Image: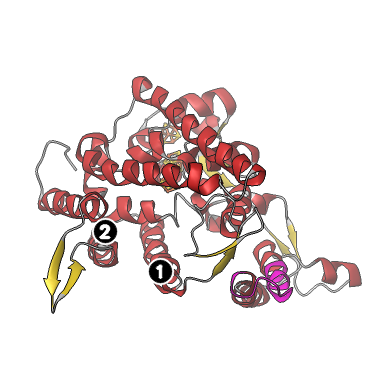
Amino acid sequence: MDNNKISWAKIFSIFGLIWLASSFIHPLHVSLGGKMVQINAYPEIYLIPLFGIWRLRTEKQPYQRNRIKWMLGLFFLYWVLLFNLYPKVPFVDGTTHTTYLAVHMVGSLPFFLMLIAVAFMGKRADCGWNCPCVFDRETIGFAFRDATLKGDFWWRFRHIKWIGLITVWGYFVYMLLDPAHAYQRFGETMYETILWAYYLSFLIIPFTGHRSFCRWGCPWAATWGVLNLAGFYKIKADTEKCIDCGLCERECDMGVPIRELINAKGMIRSTECMGCGRCVHVCPREVLTFHDYKDVFKSRNLSPLERNIRLAGGLTVAGLIVLDPGSPWGYLGLAFFFTGLFGFCPTYAMIGTVVKKIKTSAGRSKDL
Ligand code: SF4
Ligand code: SF4
Ligand code: SF4
């Protein structure tokens, strides 16, 4: 796509982005049957599916098509169906709040579960596949991905988000020290400021590319980014095979200087990489391969069928952690879920039962 070319996709995208930003910045109300109704409330509900269908029709790369399908599915499961449940969510300060299941609520149980997921799978657990922001940007804002600002100058701007990291974790400490006042005195203003930055950032997408907020402004980008460095996730490079064609960098929406990183460290291990997989799949020499927690569990003792049963069953039962915080069953479900995730059951190992020995090798076939 030529960045200077005005396409219908870009025109629709501009309208979509303005409408999306206006839902927070300038709510529009009309009187319907004597009641005031906000006509631009939560436009993601229809904009993401509409632009998502366009993305599915135009995306050629199978891995990205798969990612879009996952995003649309997760959007409906997590942000539409579960969003409206408003369950009781336990927080680190001992309080329980009736709120939506936001992984971005500092100190909440979903927040800690996401920290674990990112440590195991990298930022892609949220920023590549699951964040409401990625749904918006990879659908409504996607027409402007070629406007992404790249190069040494813009790469330096990534450090801005450390301010967000300090703010979020400062608030976390405040919650522990003064749970009665932390939200009123600090948290409310912090969330309000982040929301303003988040919604305003949609308006600059045509000039900066669709992931600029994720690159420079998001406090969680920094938090998850640290776990990108400390956790299991990385993209390894077989630098001998690299022909320095630069296609990987051209595809990267986070402006990561991939060639510089792989030449220096033999891998992409960066706070910025959100695990979209574009570089991995565009590379003509298959230089790059994903690596994460799966490398640790080379030998599995669960069959694919049992893994899926444990994943689905465990996740369902784990919902009790939120719906019935006092019950231990939810945590048992979570343990069951993780055995499915790793394909490894410690109990089977202890009693010597091996359902199926599966040797894994990290690589394209195991990317997901
Ligand atoms: S960087 Fe922040 S806003 Fe962007 S996808 Fe990640 S968590 Fe969401
Ligand atoms: S380095 Fe690769 S996987 Fe990471 S964000 Fe860039 S293109 Fe995506
Ligand atoms: S796309 Fe592959 S071959 Fe080309 S520069 Fe990137 S890693 Fe090297």
Say what amino acid the circle numbered 1 marks. Gly
- Quarter of the image for residue 149 reads top left
What's drawn in magenta, residue-wise?
Answer: 322-336
Whether residue 303 is situated above or below residue 91 in the rendered picture: below
* Residue 181 placement (x, y as % from top left): 56, 47
Q: Nearer the viewer, residue 349 or 28?
A: 28
* Residue 73 disc label: 1
Q: Main secondary structure of the magenta part?
A: helix
Residue in the image at 16% along x and 59% along y: 28
Label pair 2/1, CB-CB below 8 angstroms: no
Q: For the residue labelled by badge 2, is the local secondary structure a helix, a strand or a loop? A: helix
Q: Quadrant of the N terminus?
A: top left
Earlier-in-chain disc, 2 versus 1: 2
Which is nearer the eye, 44 or 290?
Answer: 44
Identity, as a three-letter code, of the amino acid under mark 2: Arg
Q: Depth check: 252 or 85 in front?
A: 85
Left or right: where 187 falls relative to 140: right
What is the x, y in percent for residue 300?
A: 74, 63
Identify residue for label 2. Answer: 55
Residue at (52%, 29%) from the top-left corner?
A: 262
How many marks overall? Answer: 2
Q: Residue at x 77, y 68 (%)?
A: 345
Q: Mark yes or no: residue 105 visible.
A: yes
Magenta region includes residue 112? no
